[in-house]
Amino acid sequence: MATSSMQQLAASLGGFHDPQSPFRLLPIADIDPDPDQPRQTFAQDLAAALADPQFQELVSNIRATRTVAVPIHVQPSGERWTLIAGERRLRAAREAGLSEIPAIISPDLSPVDRQVLALTENLFRVDLTFLEKADAFQRIAAEAGLSQREVAQKFGLTDAVMSKYFAVKKLPADILAAAKAGLVPDLETALALRSVPKEEREPLLARAAAAQLPVSRQTAERLRQRATQARTHPAAIPPPAPTPGPSPVLTLILPRRHLEALLLHHEEAAGELDDASLVQAVTDLLARLAPERQA
């Protein structure tokens, strides 16, 4: 049964029960997920979504108002409905205990148009990774026979930005694996690491994995610039100094993961671990680990 707030929302949109209206109140149990949902991580890992503070805030708001403020988009599928856009709102409404949800019915969308609509809604969300965006852009281009420029125009992006997303599929396997593990946080960092020689990049990614901390864009860009200078002016660039190991004292008082984080900090600072910089590095490390220690 729709609540009064839901009925007010329906009325404001022209009536969800009007057969001629594209707006409907649909039973949540009759709505199936879209197999082409671009936010793959969210769709596959409900447990992680339920632990997301932003998602929980959305659930709380829906539970308090008994309303989903923005309708989802669906398409008819026999006697049921296929979700086009709004999976986050649908999951939140279900978690909040609603039995119905406002929806906009779009019966005539092509498969490509469905993907464009779903991706457009999620494109600028912080929880949609650059890998998921790149995969969705390239899938739309392949299925619709669109050029890189045409895909950019559909989403209001520049050719330069879209070319970066299309370059993702050509990234080395170690960068893609690190990105999937959350160690390469954004597209610019990934593209910078692409230009770093493998013999320098692999130890850096290994330290990031051991420390469970992402590689910063600053570190990736600095290594990229060094690699570029080494190619253009090899005589002017000294070989990189080996990353020093932690002192014996630190090995006694810090877990291995924290030692790896300290070495990663050294890589980012591009400095020597003398006494003063060691103290600063440990201080910075403790600050970075503070949220974890408070959890």
Image (cartoon, helix red, strand yellow):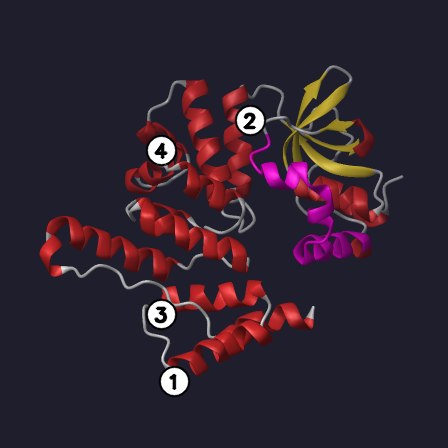
Nearest to viewer (mark 2 / mark 4)? 4
From this viewpoint, is residue 13 visible? yes
Q: Residue furthest bottom?
A: 276
Residue 21 against residue 6 in the figure, above or below = above
Q: Is residue 78 above or below residue 35?
A: above
Q: Nearer the viewer, residue 24 or 154?
A: 154
Q: How far apart are the two marked residues, 1 and 3, measured between alpha carbons?
A: 13 Å
Q: Nearer the viewer, mark 1 or mark 4?
A: 1
Q: Residue at x 72, y 24 (%)?
A: 81
Q: CA distance from mark 1 to mark 4?
A: 42 Å
Q: Is residue 165 magenta?
A: no
Q: Earlier in the sequence, mark 3 or mark 4?
A: 4
Which mark identifies residue 114?
A: 2
The residue that disc 4 covers is 170
Mark 2 Cα-neighbour bin, 10 Å: few <14, some 14–19, many ≥20? many
The CA span between labels 2 and 4 is: 26 Å
- Along the polypeptide, which appears first: circle 1 or circle 4? 4
The mark closer to the camera, 2 or 3, is 3
Q: CA distance from mark 3 to mark 4?
A: 29 Å
- Tell me which residue sits at (57%, 64%) in the image: 256
How would you rate the neighbour count of disc 1 (Cα within 10 Å): few for under 14, some for 14-19, many for 20 or more? few
Please, what is the three-letter code of the amino acid marked with disc 2?
Arg
Tag of residue 269? 3
Would you say residue 185 is visible in this rendering?
A: no
User: Over which residues does the magenta segment extend?
Assistant: 37-63
Report the amino acid beneath label 1.
Ala
Label drawn at residue 276: 1
Residue 33 drawn at (x, y percent): 69, 29
- Report, in whole angstroms, how far the alpha carbon at label 2 lies from the one at label 1: 57 Å
- State the SS at label 4: helix
Drawn side of residue 54 relative to residue 139, left or right: right
Q: Nearer the viewer, mark 1 or mark 3?
A: 1
